[in-house]
Image (tube, rainbow, N blue to C red):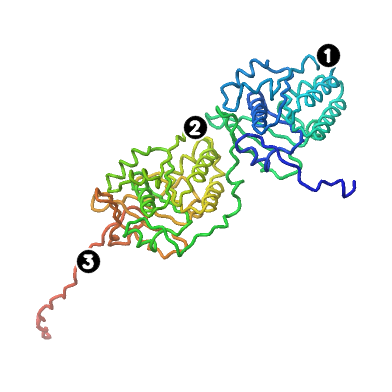
């Protein structure tokens, strides 16, 4: 091969039409490439193949879908009809379904090759899907003949500019000829985690470009497949945006802002960490309200309380959020997280962030994201690190809440061990007992790029608002939840001198 034979331009990409999959593929399938999609029955191969075909039609491309020993076309189309990507009017016009079983049975692989090449040429197809590759292998007289069939198909697709997907069962032998000849391999699987079934996708081979390695989660919904790349794979590198100590985002609470050098550093991340009922959500809402009052775009993203309930709760402590919401400065997004995957939740969060472009963000509850039954615990540290990278890359000042296991007591337990070292700022809220009464307290445990005051302060929630007041008199047990005021010591009094006894005379008794 000479230098003239080397293409001067990179091979163009063909979008898959599947949310998140092109991210794994580094931009899409290579134009004219041939790819094998493996997976057990029910993993989503047929949906993926059809979704790719219908997406290609939207770009003005024609497609051919070939079935071999699979469900009838009528059954398959009936199953696809509820999908949003399905368009009945395209079937038979720009998308053609062909059954190859009779040809394969009568003429073998040679006859099937002629059928495929003729169909691509006659219909002007640039997308080809063959559903049932395993059946073709069964009809091959030798492994060499099957390898030659796959090779000739790859050559034809490359010359015709036709991008092809070959759907088959699970991969058993990586050295099998059908896997070594094609341009790429995509594996689908379903695994059980607790009571949940989690679908996974992995790009096991991809020629001609980088791909996002490892396993990633995906859903099959009414929209079809939705792939959610692992967050730590997307945002492994720290964001180039750095916090700006000279620019602050205040809470609007004079007592608290005085403790944190005037406010949170712009583009930093903050964790409000404390026991249930200690005031984390209200404090976070105050942070958003202060920003919205200054004309900043603010976003609440939570998992339990709806917007009307949050607005009503804030009104009880003197915060009027409805006018800010009406003006579009404050938005509320609440999601059910019971059966959601962590990467799916963060994908939705970042979608909302990119749509609304907030300057301030409150994530009310990290536990539903990283403590669900489908989350692998060893990912926690890297996952949350990637989350802070993603938000900082978008130049957002973020506040997150996390609760402790205990309401109060001498021991401190956190469900997210290690996150305290990742986050920029850490504010600790809890209940303590003082003279048989429970009091809310707030401590600034960590503030990067700031002068902070780590003493324990009383934190009051009243109908007139939130107030951070004086410190406790005693430094005893500051972090045990059991502070108590010093008892004044009694003043020393001088001992009265006793009258001197007369000295004894010698000899006297």
In the image, taking residue 396 as reference, residue 317 lies left or right, namely left
**Nearer the N terminus, badge 2 or badge 1?**
1
Q: Are marks 2 and 1 in contact (CB under 8 Å)?
A: no
Mark linked to residue 339: 2
- Between the C-alphas of marks 1 and 3, the distance is 105 Å
In the image, taking residue 350 as reference, residue 256 lies left or right, namely left
The quadrant in which residue 343 appears is top right
Density class for disc 2 (Cα within 10 Å; few <14, some 14-19, many ≥20) is few
Query: Label 1 belongs to which residue?
Result: 106
Q: Are marks 3 and 2 in contact (CB under 8 Å)?
A: no
> In front: 205, or 331?
331
Q: Is residue 95 above or below residue 212?
A: above
Q: Nearer the viewer, mark 2 or mark 1?
A: 1
Query: Label 3 belongs to which residue?
Result: 489
Question: What residue lies at 43% left-to-right and 46% top-to-bottom?
Answer: 299
- Between the C-alphas of marks 2 and 1, the distance is 49 Å
- Between the C-alphas of marks 3 and 2, the distance is 59 Å
- The secondary structure type at the circle numbered 1 is helix
Density class for disc 1 (Cα within 10 Å; few <14, some 14-19, many ≥20) is few
């Amino acid at each position: 091969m000479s230098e003239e034979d080397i293409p001067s331009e990179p091979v163009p990409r063909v979008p898959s039409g599947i949310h998140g999959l092109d991210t794994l593929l580094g931009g899409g399938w290579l134009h004219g490439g041939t790819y094998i999609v493996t997976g057990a029955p029910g993993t989503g191969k047929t949906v993926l193949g059809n979704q790719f075909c219908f997406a290609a039609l939207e770009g003005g491309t024609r497609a051919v879908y070939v079935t071999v020993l699979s469900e009838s076309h009528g059954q398959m189309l009936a199953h696809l009809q509820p999908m949003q990507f399905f368009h009945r009017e395209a079937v038979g016009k720009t998308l053609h379904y062909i059954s190859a079983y009779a040809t394969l049975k009568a003429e073998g692989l040679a006859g099937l090759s002629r059928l495929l090449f003729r169909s691509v040429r006659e219909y002007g197809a640039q997308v080809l899907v063959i559903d049932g590759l395993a059946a073709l292998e069964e009809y091959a007289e030798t492994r060499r003949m099957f390898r030659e069939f796959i090779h000739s198909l790859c050559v034809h697709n490359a010359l015709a500019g036709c991008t092809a997907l070959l759907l088959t069962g699970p991969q058993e032998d990586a050295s099998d000829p059908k896997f070594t000849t094609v341009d790429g391999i995509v594996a689908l699987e379903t695994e059980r985690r607790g009571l949940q079934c989690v679908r996974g996708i992995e790009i096991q081979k991809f020629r001609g470009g980088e791909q996002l390695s490892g396993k990633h989660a995906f859903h099959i919904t009414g929209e079809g497949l939705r792939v959610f790349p692992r967050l730590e794979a997307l945002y492994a590198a720290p964001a180039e945006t750095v916090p700006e100590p000279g620019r602050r985002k205040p809470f609007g609470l004079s007592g608290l802002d005085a403790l944190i050098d005037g406010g949170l550093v712009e583009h930093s991340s903050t964790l409000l960490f404390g026991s249930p009922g200690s005031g984390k959500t209200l404090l976070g809402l105050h942070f958003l309200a202060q920003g919205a009052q200054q004309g900043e775009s603010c976003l609440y993203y939570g998992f339990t309380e709806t917007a009307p309930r949050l607005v009503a709760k804030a009104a009880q402590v003197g915060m009027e959020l409805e006018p800010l919401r009406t003006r579009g400065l404050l938005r509320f997004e609440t999601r059910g997280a019971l059966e959601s995957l962590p990467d799916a939740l963060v994908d939705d969060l970042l979608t909302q962030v990119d749509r609304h472009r907030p300057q301030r963000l409150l994530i009310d509850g990290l536990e539903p994201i990283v403590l669900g039954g489908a989350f692998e615990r060893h990912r926690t540290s890297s996952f949350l690190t990637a989350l802070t990278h993603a938000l900082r890359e978008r130049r957002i000042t973020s506040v997150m809440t996390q609760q402790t296991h205990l309401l109060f007591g001498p021991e401190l337990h956190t469900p997210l061990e290690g996150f305290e070292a990742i986050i920029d700022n850490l504010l600790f809220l809890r209940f303590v007992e003082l003279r048989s009464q429970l009091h809310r307290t707030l401590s600034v445990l960590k503030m990067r790029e700031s002068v902070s005051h780590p003493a324990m302060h009383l934190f009051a929630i009243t109908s007139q608002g939130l107030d951070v007041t004086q410190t406790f008199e005693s430094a005893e047990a500051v972090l045990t939840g059991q502070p108590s005021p010093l008892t004044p010591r009694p003043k020393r009094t001088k001992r009265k001198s006793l009258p001197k006894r007369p000295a004894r005379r010698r000899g006297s008794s």
